[in-house]
């Protein structure tokens, strides 16, 4: 069985792919979300380095609740509090907030209004709210929305960019979100409707280049991820979405995840 991509790369248009690995069962710590029988293949665009998961599974509905319960097991206040109390050196979220605030302080010192897309359990928007930002969250999961509301965060139920928002924002963030969305270019391009003229977009994506050097079985390539990235493919994603790259950096998070983050703005 082979699921070789029969289409051009959605970022660079290349039609040449290389097969990285095939998996007939979930990898260690990977959730199958009820998929049975399990099978997927990991392919990489030879030109731009984009990684693509190929499979026949319908995972379109997992973010309506199954992803939260499958990936996090619980949405209890104790888990949220435990993450919030992690020290800076061990917290992906606190380090994310720190680098965003450091960058914004220099490049957009008047910025104060944030739209966070795919907010999940709310750790990031709660942290930004506590730091003085005015925060709006977009998420499709009703349990997430209830918790976000309890934190005092304005919530929008739905899938970005198919939402109604009256405001324009200084900063729009996608933290480990776009890799879960098959039409990721159109999703990212939607920021132009809601971003102020001098606004900023921040994205975090799984660093497939760094992860693949260790193992194709790593979480950066798990079933729920349509894509993992290279530096070149992040730049192409921004360009295809009508955005300009201000900065791309690669890091390894305290949790061990290989991550590419980028600050983008309108062309």
Image (spheres, rainbow, N blue to C red):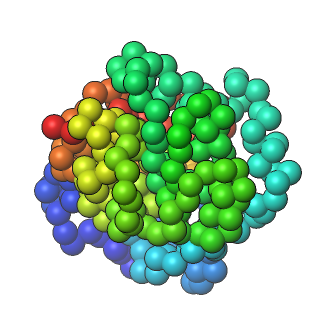
Residue 38 percent coordinates (x, y): 56, 77
Q: Is residue 243 visible?
A: yes
Left or right: 62, with 197 as reference point: right
Left or right: 131, with 102 as reference point: right
Foreground: 208 or 110? 110
| Residue at 48% over, 28% down | 100
Residue 67 percent coordinates (x, y): 61, 68
Q: Quadrant of residue 238?
A: top left
Left or right: 39, with 153 as reference point: left
Residue sticking out furthest to the top: 106
Residue 103 percent coordinates (x, y): 43, 22
Left or right: 96, with 87 as reference point: left
Is residue 221 depicted above or below 202 in this figure? Answer: below
Q: Is residue 45 visible?
A: no
Where is the N terminus found, in terms of image quarters?
Answer: bottom left
| Residue at 40% over, 24% down | 110
Foreground: 57 or 150? 150
Residue 196 percent coordinates (x, y): 29, 40
Where is the C terminus found, in terms of image quarters?
Answer: top left
Is residue 149 depicted above or below 63 in this figure? Answer: above
Residue sticking out furthest to the front: 166
Is residue 23 depicted above or below 37 in this figure? Answer: above
Q: Quadrant of residue 246?
A: top left
Q: Quadrant of residue 24?
A: bottom right
| Residue at 32% over, 59% down | 187
Foreground: 236 or 55? 236
Q: How many dots with numbers?
A: 0
């Amino acid at each position: 069985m082979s699921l070789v991509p029969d289409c051009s790369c959605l970022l660079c248009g290349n039609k040449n792919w290389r097969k990285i690995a095939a998996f007939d069962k979930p990898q260690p710590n990977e959730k199958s979300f009820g998929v049975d029988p399990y099978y997927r293949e990991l392919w990489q665009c030879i030109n731009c380095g984009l990684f693509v998961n190929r499979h026949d599974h319908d995972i379109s509905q997992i973010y309506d609740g199954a992803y939260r319960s499958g990936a996090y097991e619980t949405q209890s206040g104790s888990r949220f509090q435990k993450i919030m109390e992690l020290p800076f050196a061990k917290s992906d979220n606190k380090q994310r907030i720190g680098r965003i605030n450091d960058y914004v302080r220099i490049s957009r010192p008047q910025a104060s209004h944030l739209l966070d897309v795919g907010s999940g359990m709310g750790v990031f928007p709660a942290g930004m709210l506590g730091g003085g930002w005015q925060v709006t969250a977009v998420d499709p999961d009703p349990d997430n929305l209830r918790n976000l509301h309890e934190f005092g965060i304005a919530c929008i139920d739905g899938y970005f960019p198919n939402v109604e928002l009256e405001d324009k924002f200084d900063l729009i963030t996608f933290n480990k979100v776009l890799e879960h969305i098959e039409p990721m270019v159109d999703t990212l391009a939607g920021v132009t409707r809601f971003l102020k003229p001098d606004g900023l977009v921040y994205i975090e994506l799984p660093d497939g280049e760094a992860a693949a050097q260790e193992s194709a079985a790593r979480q950066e390539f798990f079933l729920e991820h349509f894509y993992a990235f290279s530096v070149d493919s992040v730049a192409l994603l921004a360009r295809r979405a009508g955005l300009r790259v201000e900065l791309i950096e690669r890091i390894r998070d305290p949790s061990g995840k290989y991550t590419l983050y980028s600050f983008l703005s309108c062309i």
